[in-house]
Amino acid sequence: MSLQPGKTVVKEAPRPANRKSVLDVLFGRPLSSEEDSRERVGPAAGIPIFGLDALSSAAYGPEAALTVLIPLGIVGLGYIVPISALIIVLLCIVFFSYLQTISAYPTGGGSYTVASENLGEFPGLLAAAALMIDYILDVAVGISAGVGALISAVPALQPHTLGLCLGILLILTLINLRGVREAGLAFMAPTYLFVGCLGTVIAIGVFKVWATGGHPVPVVPPPTLPPPSAAVSAWLLLKAFASGCTALTGVEAVSNGVTAFREPRVKCARITLGAIVGILVLLLAGIGYLVRAYHIGATEPGARGYQSVLSQLTAAIAGRNLFYFVTIGAILVVLSLSANTAFADFPRLCRAVAEKGYLPYPFAFRGRRLVYSYGIYALVLLAGFLLIIFRGITDRLIPLFAVGAFLAFTLSQAGMVMHWKRTGGRGARTSMLINGIGATATGITVCIILVAKFTSGAWITVLLIPTLILLMSGIRRHYDKIMRETAHHGPANLSGISPPIVVLPMDHWSRVAEKALRFGYAISREICVLHIASEESREKGTEFSRLWHEYIEAPAKAAGLEAPELVILYSPYRQVITPIFQHILDIERQNPDRQIAVLVPELVERRWFYYLLHGQRATALKLVLYLKGNHRIIVIDIPWYLSS
């Protein structure tokens, strides 16, 4: 194809070949940008995508509270209903607050967006850091809780806890890299099975409680609760409330992912959030009521004979039959898949932050299936690291949990108060009141969680949040520095252009060297060929000089070209890269108004393992030039493709 100087040509990039690859089998065919609308979902698929974290928290939120109450023995069960009621009230406040947020930010109103636009840069980064840590913990806690449910049913699997956790993490990664729509379809059946099974357990249990006048007889008696070993105190109850508040994590997900819904997106998002919160309220209320009626308490996590609260509750109400194992299986799957909420939202949050320059730009790029792949990779690596550190034990991760979520809740609601104050309009006062109540309630909860969980591990989160803010600020400063240094707002300066001085390192004469020399003549007539010879091989240098006249100098003169300058550098310490680099710097200093083009001939193998058979001097030279060179030194690869 011939070039057409001065003409603007607009073309469509070629589409990928139709050949099936391993990537196509694992992740599906690449999706074009035009197919984005087909990937959007409605409320039915939105519930498993954005609600799994919130719904599954019914399995570990009440248990986390009951675990704190273990020292109170059977007395502690008397406090689980009021604690559950307080958590449900807080959940309803957060729900109405986020309904306002969805309406005000139809393009996605996560805490970062709301806080940064209405409260400023630092509150926005604080919300982003808190949410990132919360999403990472979502994955680790969800998977570990799911494996905990499996171990309750099959205790023999306890030694394999960590391996099971990492296996589930890998499966979730593969599913989410296939795209939002496919993830929703994959998780729809287990989500509704979980809700149906747990709803059935609660309905049967409530019926039995009412039918027996509040004294039901368990089909399988739960473990006997130990006698009280501590007195009731406000501090212990606050710790139980703080642990139970983990049931609210994930509620923000819908407001952050509004753009994933089909039109009318705001209506779909609000319906989805309403369904998620409604189901969660029923589950939390039912579990709190029934564990007290059946005298079910938590067992020591990670200890021999551990049984989850839901395992005990299901066995007490329905017995250890087929229905029990289906229910436990559904709980296991949904707890494990609850991490999908973080897989859906963490990459979107990273994209929003990266677009403002506070995270590396690749986080804003969509992958082959229209998902933000780099965000998924980061989430998997960090969550996997947490699982390995804490050995996949849920109770060890819980103390780090919920601080980030409630801090993000508070900043988001405070930002919405400022939003309504700034925009005004009909209903603004009512909206301000709703969001103000939400900010106050969640702010108080943050303080309670911090105080109650600080020594148990929340201090780690408190340290991580400012560390992450400093990291993001450093990334932004780096990008700002690049923009200041590279910005150019004037017309192109195309006068006074002169060809570069070409430097060509040459070990011996070959077809690769000939290709590099021909390219050198194509861009300049000033060529310097560098040849390195050690003191022990001066004869080799002399031999190269003899070949020089026959193979290079004479053909150049015959073609009407000036022969290149030949520089033979003797290296007494057998170094190669350093002498070449130093000579290039000398040429650059002697020619302050010229560019230096360094041609680096390089073999290209068809198979990666063949590179093990070659020295990597070309790569080392390029690395030194990139790290220690300057803007007037240009490195040009001259590849020679070896036949298969």
Image: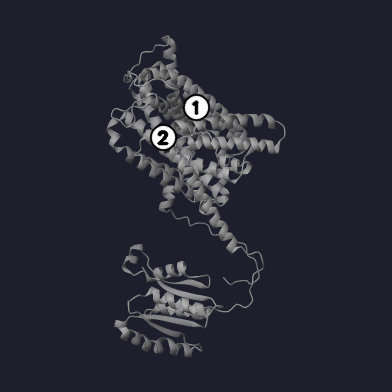
Instruction: Indicate left or right for 425 with 248 as reference.
Output: right
Left or right position of 412 against 388 = right
How far apart marks 1 and 2 lie (CA) works out to 29 Å
- Image x and y of residue 63, in percent: 40, 27
Identify the mark at residue 370; answer none if there is no mark.
none
Question: Few, some or many C-alpha atoms within 10 Å of disc 2 (few <14, some 14-19, many ≥20)?
Answer: few
Element on which disc 2 rests: helix
What type is the residue that disc 1 sits on? Leu
Q: Quadrant of residue 325?
A: top left
Q: Residue furthest top?
A: 213
Residue type pointed to by label 2: Thr
> What residue is shown with label 2?
455
Say few, some or many: other residues with alpha carbon within 10 Å of mark 1 (under 14 / 14 to 19 / 20 or more). Answer: many
Q: 120 or 576: nearer the eye? A: 120
Is residue 266 visible in the rendered image? The answer is no
From the viewer's perspective, is residue 55 above or below residue 641? above
In the depicted structure, whether residue 21 falls above or below residue 506: above
In this rendered view, identify the residue nearer to me: 546 or 511: 546
Q: Tell me how many marks there are.
A: 2
Q: Position of residue 147 (x, y in %)?
A: 36, 34
Q: Earlier in the sequence, mark 1 or mark 2?
A: 1
Is 463 positioned to the left or the right of 612 in the image?
A: right
Of tags 1 and 2, which is closer to the observer?
2
Q: Quadrant of residue 611?
A: bottom left
Q: Which residue is mark 1?
A: 280
Q: Residue at x 34, y 87 (%)?
A: 542
